[in-house]
Amino acid sequence: MIDIDKIEKLAALKLKEKEKKAILNDLEEIIHYFEILKEVDTEDVEPQIYTKEACLFLRKDKAENGLNKEDLEKNKTLASGNFYRVKHIIGE
Amino acid sequence: MTITDLPISSLINKLRNKEITAREVIENYAKNIYEKEENIKAFISLDIEKALKRAEELDKMDEKKGLLFGVPVAIKDNMNVKNCETTAGSKILKRYISPYNATVVKKLKEENAIIIGKTNMDEFAMGSSNENSSFFPTHNPVNYDYVPGGSSGGSAAAVKGEEALAALGSDTGGSVREPAAFCGIVGLKPTYGLVSRYGLIAFSSSLDQIGPLTKNVKDSAIMLNAIAGFDPHDETSVNIKKEDYTELLGKEIKGKKIGIIKEVMEFNIQEEIKEELNKTISTLVKLGATIMEISIAHLKYALPAYYIVAPSEASSNLSRFDGVRYGLTLQGENLTSTYELTRTEGFGEEVKRRILIGTFALSAGYYDAYYLKASKVRKMLANEFEKAFETVDTLLLPTTATTAFKLGEKKSPLEMYMSDIFTIPVNLAGLPAISVPHGSDKNGLPIGIQLIGSWFKEKELLQIAYAVEPG
């Protein structure tokens, strides 16, 4: 039922065969457990995405002090000057 | 009584009266850390030197201001503390240096708390035992052979082991309350939206909430006073009037209506936990409260609904860890293989399992059957709680069905997920809840009693928690 190769690709993971087999077994057990929800009649029920009181708001479109470039640079991995340097993605 | 035995208000009084210095406070906690940390392993990173320096600065202040003046606090390692490493318990974030402070950290600092270190946790807060930390498991200070609970297990162990006076944790499905119960301390999960999540590494955005772990209920209220409040940087933050959460502590609870959830008793609960629950009921009756039976008919569906919603949101939230901007990077032949190599190497087994569950639940053809269905069940549960709170003030139930288990004891993921059975419904509904220690089992392992309040009724919830708190 679970196309593990497809899911793995969507999740940007590349598992070793042994790991994949173990995780697939767990996944099947867990997803089988989810079947219990089929007992619940949810006809005409609105889904709840956020909780009761939370109402998303927007901030005013006003510039604020952002993060320091120096602070961010402490974590540079693929950074190069003001840019991140990654392998080309066009024409792959 | 030693300095590390003192709760927050007594410690601050002694500091204000100049009976002790902030430096002495940190030195005493540091002594405990040097003696116990080897066995407990509560911290991923510690900076005692920095804490001592800050203590000396506080000692020089003429006015000893701040709700947490000189209080040594530990922070779960999924909250940003500027210029400190923040790993979320994952090797994918090893050596990540926070470029800013989380709002809660900023607030603690403004109240003159002293940050002593960052605590161990299940990787990305996914776990109930702290065994999913990428680095090492934390041990329960009550008995080192047992888990401290999770995912805020390091925070709970640090407080129980008196390595910090208070700590912050995050609670997505019980991650503050379950470790508090397992370690025998107080853990509070506030209403969703009361405490800013800005600077907390997201696991499941519609469920995550930051809360304090403390020695007692009063300390919990003081910590909540410090960290609660509207924050425009968290778009789910709710703008409500600032309250004093200590205000009702010690006020009589006569006439309060306490609900016992009928369906909870259908689960297999350790006998000694049932006994402590009954003792709590007797205390409440003696104090003049009325006990009522309440039905939350869909309670048993909370766990499967949660394990669809939380991994789905996690699969989306964790997509940011791709090796480009921060953390671990493993270069592949192209950008896609860089992502795949980095994520496969950087994430631990449970994190990968949950990302895959979530990706599956959100994938084409399955969305309606899983995520949408779970979101509807979630709505039904929230509605049932809302109805319950029309009748009662607070709900009373165990925090966990068992006391702490041994390290390495639980093997299957599903078995581990069951540890959160009584805490998860609270997060799905966004309610506030608190775990209060109440007795122990025959092995001396602590028992936690849970109280659930209505939305934003923390003041009343803490009042009842204070009334049932032993000793």
Image: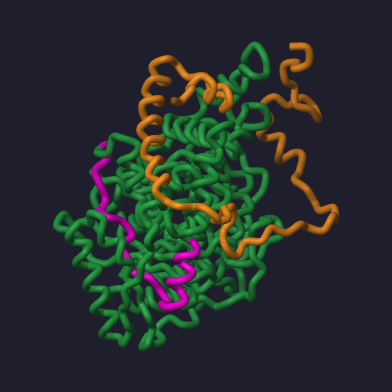
Chain colours: A orange, B green
Q: Residue furthest left?
A: B442
Q: Is residue B18 visible?
A: no
Q: Looking at the image, which is closer to me, B54 or B260?
A: B260
Query: In the rendered view, would you say B156 is above or below B87?
Result: below
Q: Where residue B452 sits in the image (x, y, percent)? A: 41, 67
Q: Looking at the image, which is closer to me, B18 or B374?
A: B374
Q: Residue at x 28, y 35 (%)?
A: B411
Query: In the rendered view, would you say B118 is above or below B441?
Result: above
Q: Quadrant of residue B136?
A: top left
Q: Quadrant of residue B441?
A: bottom left
Q: Residue at x 30, y 86 (%)?
A: B287
Q: Where residue A36 sits in the image (x, y, percent)? A: 37, 44
Q: Is residue A21 visible?
A: yes
Which quadrant: the C terminus of chain B? bottom left
Q: Where residue B199 sits in the image (x, y, percent)? A: 62, 50
Q: How many marks?
A: 0
Q: Residue at x 45, y 68 (%)?
A: B220
Query: In the rendered view, would you say B334 is above or below B232?
Result: above
Query: In the rendered view, would you say A72 is above or below B196?
Result: above
> Viewed as shown, does residue B90 lie left or right of A88?
left
> Viewed as shown, does residue B104 lie left or right of B275?
right
Q: Looking at the image, which is closer to me, B72 or B329?
A: B329
Q: Where residue B1 sits in the image (x, y, percent)? A: 30, 70
Q: Residue at x 62, y 61 (%)?
A: A54
Magenta segment includes B394: yes
Q: Quadrant of residue B213?
A: bottom left
Magenta segment includes B456: no
Q: Residue furthest right?
A: A62
Which region is colored magenta? B382-408
